Image (spheres, rainbow, N blue to C red):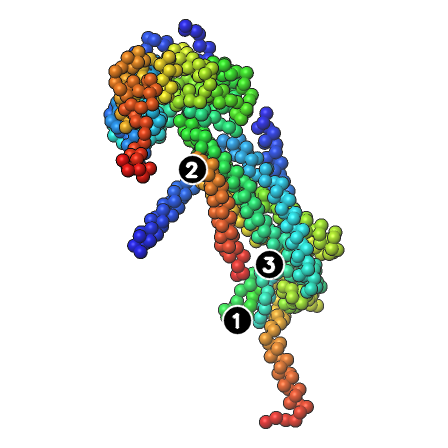
Amino acid sequence: MKTRNTEILVGTFVLLGFVALFFLALKAANLGNFSTEPTYAISARFDNIGGLKARAPVRSAGVTVGRVTAITLDPKTYQGVVSMDIRNGFQFPKDSSAKILTAGLLGDQYVGLEPGAAEANLAAGATITQTQSALVLENLIGQMLFNMAADAGSTGGAKP
Amino acid sequence: MRESAPFLLRRVAPSTLHSDSLIEIDRVSFGYDASRTILNDVSLRFERGKVTAILGGSGCGKTTLLRLIAGVHPATSGRVVFDGEAVNAQDKAQLYRLRRRLGMLFQFGALFTDLTVFENVAFPLREHTDLPESMVRDIVLMKLNAVGLRGAAALRISEVSGGMARRIALARAIALDPELIMYDEPFAGLDPISMGVAANLIRKLNDATGATSLMVSHDVLECFSICDYAYLLSSQGQVVAHGSPDELKASPHPEVRQFIRGEPDGPVRFHYPAPPLAQDLGVSA
Amino acid sequence: MTAAIAHLGRFTLQVLRSLGHAAFFFIDLLRFSPAALRRFGLVVAQVHAIGNRSLIIIAASGLAVGFVLALQMYYALVTYGAAESLGLIVNLALVRELGPVVTALLFAGRAGTSLTAEIGLMKAGEQLAAMELMAIDPRARVLAPRFLAGIVSMPILALIFSAVGILGAYVVAVLLIGVDAGNFWSIMQDRVDVWRDLGNGIVKSAVFGLICTFVALYQGYETQATPEGVAHATTRTVVIASLGVLGMDFILTALMFSTP
């Protein structure tokens, strides 16, 4: 009967929709990467987080080991507090340092972890104290101008 | 002439029913908007088990009367009584009950063009009853047989002719064996053979099922050949005359005579109101 | 002068009145949707008429848009040495915007006009009146199933559009131009977020489906029962639905994708 054919065709249509959905979600988005890995949370304090955003990757030696979950301001120390989830398979020593780096020249910023030399590892909830803030363009330019002025002053005779 | 009616769902004894009125139109006035009243204080009675015709020129409110009976619009004044119950167009539950007891044949059939002939006739059965498909099939085939189209059950609506469409719509209208069947211009646009078939069907169905039939038409000849009683409406929305076909044929009333004989000029004027011809042509009188 | 003001006043009242009428119609559609869900076969039949029949044009358009996007974006990106990001750009453009919006515009043209014409002609042929006189509410039997089918079909069509578009972009970028296949997919996978980009895109297309189907059904139901009436109604469907989609797109994009 006509309704049976119709139902088969509609079922195929819906199936195609699901296939498209799965393709887009798994092959073309980040669902396939970080689905159900167990993670532990740590945090780091920065003077300036620059352009870092939530869900930015956390990398060590270039390999993605975790994600930034939240960024807040500590009201007492006025430092930026970055919370991260690191995959359980990667443990870092307690004196590891965190830097905010830029991927490529115009890319997004991410957190780079450099392992330290301590025996004990970072536990869940621990805070990384050795941090290097993001490079801020205005500070760089200001520093460069200051350096140029200092060079000119030292070679061209003292200026009052 | 009474044949067995195998296509019926329930048996009804025709002529022994009390011949009081199934429908009463009691001093009803109605207009679609306030400026133009279509029906003016009309009173009609439709007797049970009889075929009654409503005749009149175009636009005199015949179809509007059918709509008032079915509760599509509320009457501006007066009341419409169906089997002793006043029809209230705002009461959805009552309308639902009422409409299950009537079947309406629209002028051009109003068949569902996306369904086949069979599915069209099966539609009211499938929507309103829980009958199993095998029973629905039997009933549909019997109804189609009653109108002579059982062989056309598998056709699509686009493949049937106008006369056939009318008959299929009739089969659909009687699918639930209604007590009241209303026909809106059943003879309009049909060839003589189809007209004869339609008239024959209307009369036979009415007699076999004991239903009450209401025909709205302006085909005097065919109507008179099958109806028991007739009403003539004027273009002012009033009842001009009523009676049996013989009474109306013998009536001396000028409007009745003009309508029945089809005379071009009489109480209903030939010319649309206009200034004198000489004035329009600019010729001094 | 006063005549002009009176005319303007009447026009405003008329617009308000038709807005109110449309709102009541929308509420009716919602009211009869549960009943339509119980008659699931009707909804399935309508998904076939609305969704399946749109599949070819949506897929073909998706492919074409994917091809063209890849080509155009390549010429722009290669000057910055960022050709590897081609997959990412195409994906974001399709999944966030072009998928839902272009599918909705095509949907309004293809399915919207056919719905309007169908309902309009059913009304003209007195089919809806006949149904009412058979004590069957045409809104529950005819309108609500089509409404639900439209809301269901649109996201599916938009997803297929985006998926086919990305595949088309892959063909152009990797097979024709020579962008690295690995980078094409991995940069995309790294930066496209399932919930933020894909999820919001799906929500958008569901909203657009609702708009297009509602406008189409309303125009069909209110049309004059004449050829000119049906022609005007189908035109209005496309115009109003398209404007509604574009306007809603702006609002939704601002809500969903504005940077925190």
State the SS at label 1: loop
> Which mark is on residue A78?
1
Amino acid carrying mark 3 in the image:
Arg
Give the quadrant of residue B89.
top left
Q: Is residue C45 left or right of residue A122?
A: left
Q: Where is residue B160 drawn, in percent x and y?
A: 52, 22
Whether the residues at callouts 1 and 2 have beta carbons within 8 Å, the answer is: no
Chain to which mark 3 belongs: A
Q: Is residue A78 left or right of residue B208?
A: right
Respond whether the residues carrying marks 3 and 2 are from the same subunit: no
Question: For mark 3, what is the residue?
Answer: A55
Q: Residue at x 66, y 86 (%)?
A: A151
Q: Residue furthest front?
A: B284
Amino acid carrying mark 1 in the image:
Tyr
Which is more foreground, mark 3 or mark 1? 3
State the SS at label 2: loop
> Which mark is on residue C224?
2
